[in-house]
Amino acid sequence: MKPVNAVITKVVEETPTVRTFFFDTSFNPEPGQFVMAWIRGVDEIPMALSYNNAITVQKVGTATSALFKLGEGDSIGIRGPFGNGFQLKGDHILLIAGGVGAAPLSPLAEKASSEGLKVTTLLGAKTKEELVFRERFEAAGSVMVATDDGSEGIHGYVTQLIPEQENYDRIYCCGPEIMMKKVLDKVDPGKAQFSLHRYIKCGIGICGACCVDGLRVCKDGPVFGGEVLKNSEFGVYRRNECGERVRV
Amino acid sequence: MKPVNAVITKVVEETPTVRTFFFDTSFNPEPGQFVMAWIRGVDEIPMALSYNNAITVQKVGTATSALFKLGEGDSIGIRGPFGNGFQLKGDHILLIAGGVGAAPLSPLAEKASSEGLKVTTLLGAKTKEELVFRERFEAAGSVMVATDDGSEGIHGYVTQLIPEQENYDRIYCCGPEIMMKKVLDKVDPGKAQFSLHRYIKCGIGICGACCVDGLRVCKDGPVFGGEVLKNSEFGVYRRNECGERVRV
Amino acid sequence: MLSLTLTGLKLKNPLLLAAGVMGTTGGSLKRIADNGAAAVITKSLGIEPKTGHANPSMIEVDCGYLNAMGLPNPSYKNFQQEIDIAQDSGVPVIASIFGGCALDFSQIAGTLDADAFELNVSCPHAHGYGADIGTDPNLVEDITVAVKTATDAPVWVKLTPNVTDIKSIGLAAQRGGADAVVAINTVRGMAIDIESGYPLLGNRFGGLSGRAIKPAAIKCVYDLYDALDIPVIGVGGISDWKDAVEFIMAGALAVEIGSAVGNNINIFNDISKGMETFLAKKEWTFNEIYGMAHKI
Amino acid sequence: MLSLTLTGLKLKNPLLLAAGVMGTTGGSLKRIADNGAAAVITKSLGIEPKTGHANPSMIEVDCGYLNAMGLPNPSYKNFQQEIDIAQDSGVPVIASIFGGCALDFSQIAGTLDADAFELNVSCPHAHGYGADIGTDPNLVEDITVAVKTATDAPVWVKLTPNVTDIKSIGLAAQRGGADAVVAINTVRGMAIDIESGYPLLGNRFGGLSGRAIKPAAIKCVYDLYDALDIPVIGVGGISDWKDAVEFIMAGALAVEIGSAVGNNINIFNDISKGMETFLAKKEWTFNEIYGMAHKI
Ligand SMILES: Cc1cc2nc3c(=O)[nH]c(=O)nc-3n(C[C@H](O)[C@H](O)[C@H](O)COP(=O)(O)OP(=O)(O)OC[C@H]3O[C@@H](n4cnc5c(N)ncnc54)[C@H](O)[C@@H]3O)c2cc1C
Ligand SMILES: Cc1cc2nc3c(=O)[nH]c(=O)nc-3n(C[C@H](O)[C@H](O)[C@H](O)COP(=O)(O)OP(=O)(O)OC[C@H]3O[C@@H](n4cnc5c(N)ncnc54)[C@H](O)[C@@H]3O)c2cc1C
Ligand SMILES: Cc1cc2nc3c(=O)[nH]c(=O)nc-3n(C[C@H](O)[C@H](O)[C@H](O)COP(=O)(O)O)c2cc1C
Ligand SMILES: Cc1cc2nc3c(=O)[nH]c(=O)nc-3n(C[C@H](O)[C@H](O)[C@H](O)COP(=O)(O)O)c2cc1C
Ligand code: FES
Ligand code: FES
């Protein structure tokens, strides 16, 4: 599919570095699916859908900065939704979100709660101001917070909040790879799903740029079960734009 | 569409010069629609469907002769069905068939009779032996015959059989162009449909080789109402393979 | 809102009937004009009547059509009456012509009365000049010069995409005095019937048209717009108004439509309506979108 | 029933993974091999790591895909470990390589340990030899000679269709000692976003792959089979077993599959099963259909 012209209808400042861009177009994704957002003349980058018709973006570099310059009435090109989504199962689920990793998990939380599941979220960020979608997770269930600077919740990493004994049917996780690796090491991999981040070029499963071993993040993922990630490249190295191995 | 491989399952000798080739493939045409029959290595030629799964061919030249060499188990390529079909209307219809022009009219006769219409057929040929599908027309209604040599029915042209006063709701005609022109001149053009013959190249309405004035025999036809044919090239001239005008 | 002047011809919109489609009879050309085309181009006409290649001469493939008609035509000698009938429609009638040498071309253009000439310089059956005139810049220039000398009507040169560098051929046409170039003719191609091993066309291979060739055509138009000073007329795979807009943004001042006429005889009206609605919605003029992809 | 020997390599079927698709990591190459490919070809490898063009670098269009990846690759220096992982699958691993001059090519081929080399002589960013090595028969011949000198492994030369005469390039490769030619690389093309006027690729234009280019590829394979004594490997638009059979009838001894892997990672198994069933039904051998379109 060619990109559709998505006109921005609203911009919401979620944190000092994170904004949600709402569009005039709904993409009806499974929670966890992503789109390729084309900021014309600049770059095309992968973004999870945080609502049916919105992406939630952390300003980190060229394309995200260019996007932050756009407002209501401006438009970008959007291809997607691509990839798989999270598979919702069980009665009580645990969400573990680091930073803007909250973007794909928030619609999952809402879907789960609307289906009557019990939802517990562990939400981490650098500081209190950078906590993303806290209200959405709270509306869907209970929330525990960790911040790097201790400005809210526990002082430290969100992984420290993972209860040793509590009984969750499923665990869903998205955040920096190092954090996700720690989660993978700590939980029952058969119960957990992780939304991965790799350099995406084609977005449609052809070029292979996004592979974790033989698995395509853009097409077979971005969501993978913990078992296939165990003993894989995940958490060890990723590939840069050239395809060179880079330690995580 | 590319040609399908149609395997000949049965060959029926209808007259000394006309054979019906049945295929393992049904094309479910409207009566009057045609296919492009590709005798591989030889030529591709237009043929009306005389049954759902058959064409009825008069041996007149290179391709038809090559086809006559094929038998059960042999195959040809078939594209289609193409074009429009006859539009069945009214309670009592008149069919006027000259020679192998009976091919597209015979399934029309059967359809009409199965829908309870009264069917009268005027069937013409050079000689008695060359009358095509007489039994099919008889099974569908009444039949009057004309032969050039008087070996059966009246001695003369089928057009002489057209009753001056009788009340037919619709008239359907297929045969040599000169004969059809005579019919057009004699009947109420608003009531009559004619299946035309022009040199067909593409068969799909693009090249324009088959045009009668601006009308494409392969796509807008082969069946046309008498009114659009009045005061047209029809019956006056046709185009040869080069597109030159040739008097009919 | 869509009207323009193209090499001196006044057109009500930028949509023309492509050569070889519904172009053998005056009646068919007139029908297309009556259905909204701003101008119509005849089947390519040569010196002598030609029957063309054996059938199958056109086949639908996955994303387009393969044809090897083999330039069937009644010759220019028999064609003035058809042009006259087509001109009754009130739109310009462009004669597409081909030949084996510059003399053939100039003889035809010097005799026929048409509103413009489109030189089909990719005749696969040329005599004297070898198989493919349109791949040799010198021949293209010579022929263009010859035709410009023979007629006062505007001269368009239609280019083949089956070359290493289409810009060099377009520049040759421009040097020869062409008033416009037309890009592209069909892309060489072939298909095989796997049930029998036979090539699907009577001529074994042919030219690909339709949706499949649009990206190649857009690239040619884009490059020619950059390289030339004369207008580029785009053709190849247009089947809706979006395609037409894409060509114009790539740098086509007008477009021709061929294969898509088969399934929609009213395509010219449909596309012009679609373009008008689009421009109105975007508050853009035709001039603003013309060559737009080069400006950003 | 489908097994064959191709330039000395034993293949269980004639189906190979095309260069640039799932070819950057040993893991992805191995996955494709495990899913039925008889051999896999790596992403094209150059002298230095390359990031490639800005995104969008690949876009689906009407009947295929446009890509302008820009040859992103980690360089041959970092790639032996990936080849080794891929070879664990048990199938031959062919290294696709590119460079700006014969020396680049021979340096890479002389260093890497692979079962064969495929020379990508249509790098759009070659230094020294200008934009398009693969359009110049002399350069193609020189590079082929250089690589043949540097390695004992079979050498395949992959040809671009964007030339006036692909046969002349194929003959040059053959003169240079190539063991096979591969046809075709992508067809140059472009698409424009009509909502904004922007070209849809970061690089503005790119190469067309997928269904749209099959007729062009079949024609190239057909012509090369006639012109050359070495085998032709076909590639371009294959998405089911019928397409593969069509290429083999056109004269391809084996075929490569690229874009269609995206939607069907199991395509190699699917196609080999489909071909086996077809041959059994027709009571034909692989050898009977190989080049069949030339024999009737
Ligand atoms: C499936 C998926 C979903 C994502 N969802 C979100 C989300 O919801 N919200 C969010 O803020 N971010 C998300 N990201 C990350 C986001 O794509 C990057 O932050 C963004 O591409 C940065 O672009 P930039 O030009 O601003 O940064 P740059 O200046 O280009 O570089 C900064 C870093 O961004 C990353 N990056 C750049 N281009 C790409 C690319 N094509 N593919 C992957 N990473 C790239 C690289 O790691 C790079 O080092 C997601 C990534 C993936 C793979
Ligand atoms: C819509 C349509 C339906 C037809 N249905 C039947 C039918 O049911 N039964 C039947 O016997 N015949 C039918 N015909 C006529 C049939 O197509 C010709 O008899 C046949 O093409 C002759 O081929 P040939 O090679 O044997 O003759 P040739 O040796 O090629 O020449 C004999 C004559 O056949 C005609 N012819 C040849 N090629 C074509 C072509 N591509 N298109 C049209 N006419 C051609 C020409 O008038 C030519 O002068 C139909 C024609 C049309 C247009
Ligand atoms: C059946 C057919 C016949 C054609 N005949 C001619 C011709 O006589 N002269 C010519 O210059 N181009 C000819 N063409 C090429 C078209 O004019 C056009 O360049 C090409 O088909 C691409 O446009 P499309 O994709 O809209 O069909 C022909 C194309 C078709 C499909
Ligand atoms: C994303 C992508 C990347 C490609 N990269 C290369 C490459 O690095 N080297 C090369 O020789 N061909 C490359 N190609 C061309 C393919 O190998 C193949 O020749 C072309 O895509 C046609 O085959 P297909 O239609 O099956 O995809 C690439 C194609 C695609 C789609
Ligand atoms: S980004 Fe191309 S396969 Fe995933
Ligand atoms: S035969 Fe081509 S339009 Fe009818």
Image: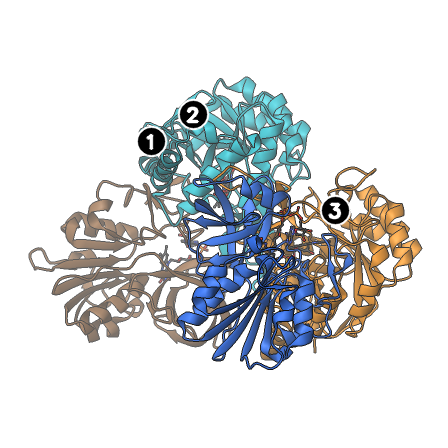
Chain colours: A brown, B blue, C orange, D cyan
Residue B142, percent from left and from top: 48, 70
Residue under label 1: D85
- Compared to residue B95, the image places residue A157 above or below, namely above
Ligand 4 within 8 Å of the CB at mark 2: no
Which mark is nearer the camera, 1 or 3? 3
Q: Chain of mark 2?
A: D
Query: Callout 2, which amino acid?
Result: Ala
Q: In the image shown, does C114 or D76 lie closer to the viewer?
A: C114
Q: Which mark is residue D114?
A: 2
Quarter-of-image position of residue A120: bottom left
- Quadrant into which the C terminus of chain A falls: top left
Give the answer, above or below, for where C283 lies relative to A47.
Answer: below
Q: Which mark is residue A221?
A: none
Secondary structure under the numbered disc 3 in the rendered image: loop
**According to the image, label 3 marks what residue?**
C122
Amino acid found under the numbered disc labelled 3: Ser
Q: Badge 1: few (under 14), some or many (20 or more) residues near its Cα, within 10 Å?
A: some
Mark 1 element type:
helix
In the shown orientation, is residue A44 left or right of residue C275?
left
Point out residue B153 in the picture as x, y percentages from the top left corner. 58, 63
Q: Does the beta carbon of the residue at mark 3 sit less than 8 Å from ligand 3?
A: yes
Q: Are marks 1 and 3 on the same chain?
A: no
In contact (CB < 8 Å): disc 2 and disc 1: no
Distance CA(mark 2)–CA(mark 3): 44 Å
- Is residue A219 visible in this depiction of the protein? yes
